[in-house]
Amino acid sequence: LSHRIQDSLAFNHIDAIFCIVDDEVTWAVIDRLSEEYGGARFDFCVAVGGGKALDIGKGISRSLAVPVVTVPTIASNDSPASRAIAVYNESHQLIDVAEMRANPAMVIVDTEVIMEAPFRFLAAGIGDAVSKRFEARACFESAGVNSRGRRPLHSALAIADGCYVMLRLHAALAMEASRSGVIDEHFEAVIEANILLSGLAFENGGLSIAHAMTRGLMKLEGPQSHLHGEQVAYGLLVQLALDPHRAEELEDVQSFLRSLGLPTRLEHLDCAGSEGDLENLVLGALTAPHIRNFPDAVTSERLRSAVVLVESL
Ligand SMILES: [Zn+2]
């Protein structure tokens, strides 16, 4: 891939300095690389790769105050179009969600490149995207705020709903396409939902319990090594289980997630679900600011019961 990029830049007379990153997204790494490359005068920073490479690229562009172009090579999460940067510590615990001054100037997606990634990434991206409709609605109904600190607009709900409809329509066939390696309209639609709509939906519509649950899952040994979207998929079930009126929807979403091979129980995330696990899970989730973006107050008891319900399905 780097040869293709080099050739393309050379063909277009664009000078570039290349930097290959394979690090955790920490402030130390972002600061070190920003310092290392800060001497050159850049017009923009292009971040190519998976979640970590994109977030490090965003971090450098933030430090050097230049626009960033993101080029995701997998469709596993909602980050490429957003201005958020998830920053971790050395032991892969999320410590900060920093924001760039503006969203990426461009998001370039080549579905031929995305097709080369294992289909587990595509499924994870669907897990991350499918929750947005429920999270945006919960945020809207609870007068919560999005990542800009603003109340979501109806247009954000429309984007989140559209994202959901597209996934329900195309996800299964896109997974088939991913397995067979043939790009078709279903694959293209899911890439658009996973990368663009999912990002627009969370930034404008706000997050809720599904994403709050990832803070708890990251505290547990098994789940923390799973992909973000896999954690969100499980978190979505917990969010739906919090509302007794959504039993039917809970079952429907659960079978949808299961059909895509996404985790619907803690054991699918390599977690036994001991008393201690449940306690850490709930305590971690309650630290997320978006835990408040839910129509009625979420206590540790309620959250625990919701997890127990999901486990019993
Ligand atoms: Zn997410």
Image (cartoon, grey):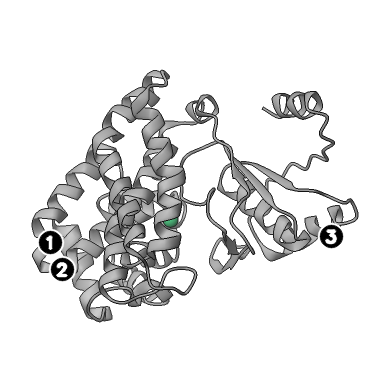
Lower position in the chain sequence, tag 3 or tag 2: 3
Quarter of the image for the C terminus: give it. Answer: bottom left
Query: Between 184 and 30, which is closer to the camera in this rendering?
Result: 184
Q: Which residue type does callout 1 highlight?
A: Arg
Q: Can you tell me which quadrant of the image ligand 1 is in? A: bottom left
Q: Is residue 279 above or below residue 31?
A: below
How crowded pointer 1 is (Cα within 10 Å; few <14, some 14-19, many 20+) is rated as few
Quarter of the image for the N terminus: give it. Answer: top right
Residue at screen point 70% across, 61% down? 62
Q: Which residue type does callout 3 highlight?
A: Glu
On the image, which quarter does residue 143 sit in? bottom left
- Residue 22 pos. (x, y %): 68, 46
Mark 2 and mark 1 in contact (Cβ < 8 Å)? yes
> What element does badge 2 sit on?
loop
Any atom of ligand 1 within 8 Å of the CB at mark 1? no
The total number of labels drawn is 3
Q: Which residue is mark 3?
A: 35
Q: Is residue 80 left or right of residue 36?
A: left
How crowded pointer 2 is (Cα within 10 Å; few <14, some 14-19, many 20+) is rated as some
Q: Which mark is residue 178?
A: none
Q: Which residue type does callout 2 highlight?
A: Asp
